[in-house]
Image: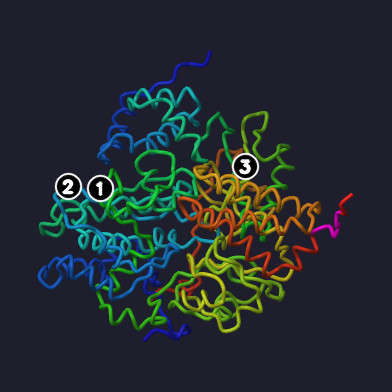
Amino acid sequence: MSETKSFNAKDLSEIEKLTAKYPEKQAAVLPVLWYAQDKFGHVDPSVQKLVAQTMDLPEALIYGVVTFYTQFYEKPMGKHVLDVCTCLSCQICGGYDILHYLEEKLGIKAGETTPDGKFSIQSVECLGACAYAPMLQVTNDKYVNHLTREKVDQLIEDLKAGKQPGFESNKMPQHENGSD
Amino acid sequence: MPNDWKTYKPLLLPAIKDLHEISIYEKNNGYQALRKILKDRETWSPKNVTSEVKTANIRGRGGAGFNAGLKWSFMPEPDGKPRYLACNGDESEPGTFKDRKIFEFNPHLFIEGAIIAAYAMQVEVIYVYIRGEYRPFVKMLQKAIEQAYEKGYLGKKVQGSDFSVDMYTHMGAGAYICGEESSLMESLEGKRGYPRVKPPFPAQRGLWGRPTTINNIETLANVPLVMNYGADWYLRIGPDTHPGPVLYGISGHVNRPAVYEYPAGMNIMTLINDVAGGMRGGKKLKALIPGGSSTPPLRADMLEGVTMDADSLREAGSMMGTAGMVVMDEDTDMVDLIWRISYFYAHESCGQCTPCRDGTGWLEKTLRKIKNGDGELRDLDLLLAICHRMEGRTICALADAAAWPVRYSIDRFREEFERKCKKTVYAVA
């Protein structure tokens, strides 16, 4: 039996704040699911049930939303989820090479999680970083751009050591000659 | 006028350090357009603002290229009940990565534009829908919104006027289709992102059944320019029929892939060879996707004299889309590329309409077969037949967006597709 999941008083007040942005409570489904995923690491059926009960909405509706959007994890994932873009610009600039290198390095295929639960790899659609290909996103957060095997190695080492990547600002070439 | 690209200074994303901070933005003419409007409400009534923006002909930068002011004018007269502005920062069209630059480098320009749009349409609530993958950018915009509230540009009685407006961010969670305006509204209402049947159009029945206008982020960022310097000034930037600055997102096999801001109507070869530093490794240019994955690919020999604006690209056989240009060199395998685009659309089809749900799947499967060397010549006819059964037969344009790259690639790169197919002719036994 898995332990029963619940929201505490602080969670409930945060959820109330999220709901207040909209004229109807259902509109807060995506924000509340994000909140729940941040807290529990995923939105598996037990979390979906909790969200449904908390928002007083049908469980089927929550399930429908969760399964429509790719960023909601329907089951527990690895501690670090590596989403490698292989779409269009990333495809023609080595996205698959990076994906395959990661698969080889971690000994798993895209869509799988390492046995120690540390890493999951996914091949994903365009992440909107086309000029900085190949690239990947770490657990629905920071982008790591201009990937090379060395950069991938470093990223894995950092994540193992508990160090999350920082935000990489990609300056516009027109900004590089200094400010006006 | 700033039409010579060599001397052009960016207007949407000027090279000013820390422009994302409201104090720096204010020092650089920021929120002046909004102040000007609120100070002289007689000259700048909502109708007059709409008319000025309509005259400026800001063509929607999200892909459709529709006159933004004209779109605003579709909103019915206020009836005292809520009406909404939804800002589209979904930016999921493969090859597109420009709006994130606005969130990072000049968020207040967009916020000011959205407030002016809200004023013009007499809207009191603005939602900014941003794709879930852009989490760090959502945080940046959120911070800018908080600053705008502190300075009284958002909230009750903006700058002491009787105009009040709120702005909220809403984060998607990974679904290309949510960039389609009616799907975006469904997603904002907390549902699966299924596009709605039109009519009724959003201006009649949008969010929660109320009048709603959806504008792209870059489109709204153009609004303060128009209101500061006038429609006449704006119309002198770029081509007559497609005025204003454009954020060109150039990616693929060039030496300096990046987002660049130049007037609309830039010569494509200038963008590739001069702006983006030419082809990587001295390779030859093979093809270009001019405005995101759904715009038909053009062969290198079709690009002579073609410029990045709606008219020129239509004549050349493609579309402006989002100006997300994907440059491909001679080593690019077009069959592989088109298969991957088809895989994308099959993955992103919402599944509501059969021609799209099944069609995108069959395009992907058939192209996979050809790419793996198991295709036959008749599969090319099959692909075209599937395209024909998809185009124009669905609720939204995703089916068309999926069919066009396939249709036009088979037409324009026929030899390459044929080479991949087995030349077997099956005799009737």
Magenta stretch contains residue B228? no
Q: The residue tagged with tag 3: helix, strand or loop?
A: strand
To which residue does mark 2 refer? B81
Q: CA distance from mark 2 to mark 1?
A: 8 Å
Q: Nearer the viewer, residue B75 or B243?
A: B75
Q: Is residue B425 magenta?
A: yes
Residue occupied by mark 3: A122
CB under 8 Å between discs 2 and 1: yes
The span picked out in magenta is B421-426
Q: Nearer the viewer, mark 3 or mark 1?
A: 1
- Dot 1, how many residues are within 10 Å of its Cα: few (below 14), some (14-19), or many (20+)? some
Q: Local crowd at mark 3 within 10 Å, few (<14), some, or many (≥20)?
A: many
Quadrant hosting residue A7: top left
Q: Left of B30 or right of it: where is B140?
A: right
In whole angstroms, how far apart are the C-alphas of marks 3 and 1? 39 Å
Count of numbered circles in the view: 3
Q: Chain of mark 1?
A: B
Secondary structure that dominates the magenta span = loop
Q: Find numbered disc 1 in the image and state the secondary structure of the residue it sits on.
A: loop
User: Residue at label 1?
Assistant: B210
Q: Residue flagged by tag 3: what amino acid is it?
A: Gln
Q: In the displayed structure, does residue B182 sit left or right of residue B158?
A: right
- Provide residue B57's location: percent of width, then percent of height: 33, 74
Q: Could you tell me if the residues under marks 3 and 2 are in contact, i.e. CB atoms within 8 Å?
A: no
Can residue A7 be seen here? The reply is yes
Q: Residue at x 81, y 54 (%)?
A: B373
